């Protein structure tokens, strides 16, 4: 969801973008790109989602860890710099298999400093994938809301602006930190989002196994570069705009 939008975003701004084709876990699929040299490898391919990772931990490891190993090996040979997607779940990396794979990506990044790389801890991106809360609320497919949960919700366009800023200021950021948060710096209750979107169903208080209760991005590095979020998930006009996209 982020990758397809980022390709268009960068292409529209005049960058030459080559989209990787094939399964990243199969190293042979990388061979056809070894005659190329790139300024950046932006690695966003992964299996995401906390709950499903409990059902298929081996599949998540193969996609997120083995696939990323191939990406790091390729970047070391053919790219000047690398950005890769981590997750806010890496803050509590023992909580679920998905979070563990994202923390392992950050360990990989620390081991592969022969290629300058930065891990991007994305917080909760909206509108997000079809299986995520925002889209399910739009389709009236939510059966209950956990009123204890708070999330740092960042609109995908704000996320793209942050990635572009990171590309433009890569070395300055990399010299200070190799893993960065990308969010708004504000945490919003999930129940407030649901109410703003017209949800009038059941609210419960529980903490499902492996899920974080509260997320909040540290965006000092972004604000120092003059960035601030433009979209607010509690703004009804933003919801209308997204629904029409």
Image: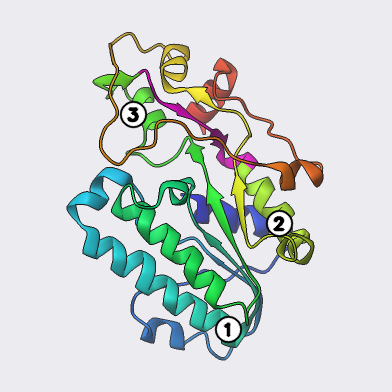
Q: Residue 191 magenta-drawn? A: no
Circle 1 crowding by C-alpha within 10 Å: few under 14, some 14–19, many from 20: some
Callout 2 touching callout 3 (CB < 8 Å): no
Q: Which residue is mark 2?
A: 166
* Residue drawn at the location 53% of the way across and 47% of the way down: 122
Foreground pick, 43 / 106: 106
Task: Measuring from the top left, give residue 75's x and y in whole percent.
Answer: 56, 79
Residue under numbered circle 1 = 76
Magenta region, residue range: 147-158
Look at the numbered disc 3 and give the secondary structure of its residue.
helix
Q: Is residue 187 above or below residue 79?
A: above
Residue 6 spot, x, y in % from top left? 58, 54
- Tell me if residue 150 is in the magenta stretch: yes
Q: Residue at x 49, y 60 (%)?
A: 44
Give coordinates of residue 14: x percent, y percent. Answer: 74, 61
Whether label 1 touches label 2, CB < 8 Å:
no
Foreground label between 3 and 1: 1
Mark 2 and mark 3: Cα distance apart in space: 31 Å
Left or right position of 163 against 236? right
Viewer can see residue 22: no
């Amino acid at each position: 969801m982020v990758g397809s939008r980022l390709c268009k975003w960068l292409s529209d701004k005049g960058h030459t973008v080559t989209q990787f084709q094939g399964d990243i876990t199969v190293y042979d699929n990388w061979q056809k790109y070894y005659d190329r040299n790139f300024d950046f490898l932006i690695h966003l391919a992964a299996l995401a989602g906390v709950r499903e990772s409990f059902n298929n931990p081996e599949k998540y490891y193969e996609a997120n860890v083995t696939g990323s190993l191939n990406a790091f090996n390729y970047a070391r040979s053919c790219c000047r710099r690398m950005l890769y997607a981590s997750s806010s779940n890496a803050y509590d990396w023992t909580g679920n298999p998905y979070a563990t794979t994202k923390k392992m990506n950050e360990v990989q990044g620390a081991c592969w400093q022969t290629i300058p790389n930065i891990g991007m801890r994305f917080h909760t991106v909206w509108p997000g994938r079809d299986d995520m809360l925002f889209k399910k609320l739009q389709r009236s497919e939510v059966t209950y809301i956990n009123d204890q949960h708070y999330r740092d919700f960042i609109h995908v366009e704000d996320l793209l602006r942050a990635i572009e800023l990171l590309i433009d200021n890569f070395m300055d950021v990399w010299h200070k930190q190799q893993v960065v948060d990308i969010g708004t710096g504000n945490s919003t209750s999930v129940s407030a989002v649901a109410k703003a979107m017209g949800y009038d169903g059941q609210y419960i208080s529980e903490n499902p196994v492996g899920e974080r209760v509260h997320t909040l991005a540290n965006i000092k590095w972004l604000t120092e570069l003059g960035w601030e979020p433009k979209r607010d998930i509690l703004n009804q006009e933003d919801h209308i705009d997204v629904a029409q996209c």
